[in-house]
Image (cartoon, helix red, strand yellow):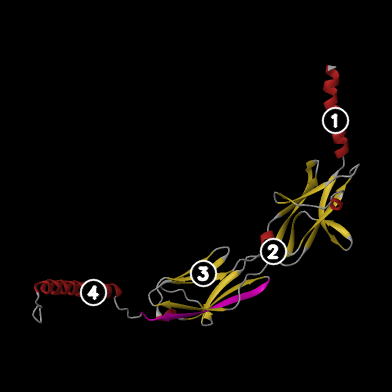
Amino acid sequence: MRIAVKVLPCLLLLTLCSQLKGAAVTVGIWNRGALVEQKGWITVNRSEAVTLDCRVEGAEKEEELVWYRERMRVNLPPHNKLNYSSICINPISDTDHLVTFACHLKRDELVNASVQLNVQFPPLLAGSEEVRVEKGNEVTLTCDVYSNPRPAVSWSKNSSSLDIGLHCQLIQDGREARLHITKAQPYHQGEYKCEATSSHGSYSKTFQLHVDGKSSRVPFEPIVAAVVVAVLTLGMAFISRIRRIAKCCKKGELPPTGQ
């Protein structure tokens, strides 16, 4: 009996190994009527569509396939699971960039294949913008330069190369290019152009910067305080006058004029 208990797990393991023997999963795309295996990553353009295909090779029986987008399982219809399965990403967006799609056997995740999307797209730069700032204040001109591949960014002023002077900074990260002016002066006024260049071409955005002189502001708080004091003074004088009139009326005489 003990021998049978020990032998049974071994038989089950051997059976499983024999079923998996030679089984392999391939992920690819169709090209001219043939499935071309893709290893590593696929380069695609934003707004296009791509179909990923997965098939089982060398299995002795039908195998059910499972797809994952990163760690999220993809829902598949029953007819799109056995030995062959495909998924379509349409349209491809920026959020699909560097996302991994994996296909594996349902009963053994170790038998799998995966591919990562390398989504290429240009920056969203276009049009012009009117910007006004008061002299001495700070202002920032911002360009959305997020794209793949990463572009080379340049700034110009009045169609000439931008000379970074006093109170002026250029800031750039993976998504934005910013021209920051800490204290706007009349000489900062003009047309600024942000241009991003990559294999997709050149894209630009222009800014019309206007620097206004400081407006002469009337001090608001002292005026309000003076009005409040004047109103309270007149109110107290009026109340005092009413009280004196009422007191005199009780005595049957009116207060003298001017009091």
Which amino acid, by three-letter code, is at mark 2? Ser
- Check disc 4: other Cα within 10 Å, few if <14, some if 14-19, many if 20+: few
Residue 14, percent from left and from top: 86, 31
Circle nearer the viewer, 1 or 4: 4
Which residue position is annotated with label 3? 178
SS at mark 4 in the image: helix
Looking at the picture, tell me which residue is in the foreground, 150 or 259.
259
**How far is mark 3 from mark 1, CA to CA?**
65 Å
Residue 145, percent from left and from top: 59, 68
Which disc number belongs to residue 93?
A: 2
Which disc number belongs to residue 12?
A: 1
Which disc number belongs to residue 231?
A: 4
Which amino acid, by three-letter code, is at mark 3? Arg
Q: Check the image and report above or below for 110 versus 101.
A: above
SS at mark 2 in the image: loop
Residue sitting farthest toward the top = 1
Left or right of residue 155, residue 198 in this image: right
**How far is mark 3 from mark 2, CA to CA?**
25 Å
Mark 4 vs 3: CB contact within 8 A: no
Circle nearer the viewer, 4 or 3: 4
Which amino acid, by three-letter code, is at mark 4? Val
Dot placed on the residue nearer the N-terminal end, 1 or 4: 1
Q: Check the image and report above or below for 82 versus 119.
A: above
Magenta range: 200-214
Residue 215, percent from left and from top: 35, 80
Looking at the picture, tell me which residue is in the foreground, 176 or 95.
95
Image quarter of the N terminus: top right
Which amino acid, by three-letter code, is at mark 1? Leu
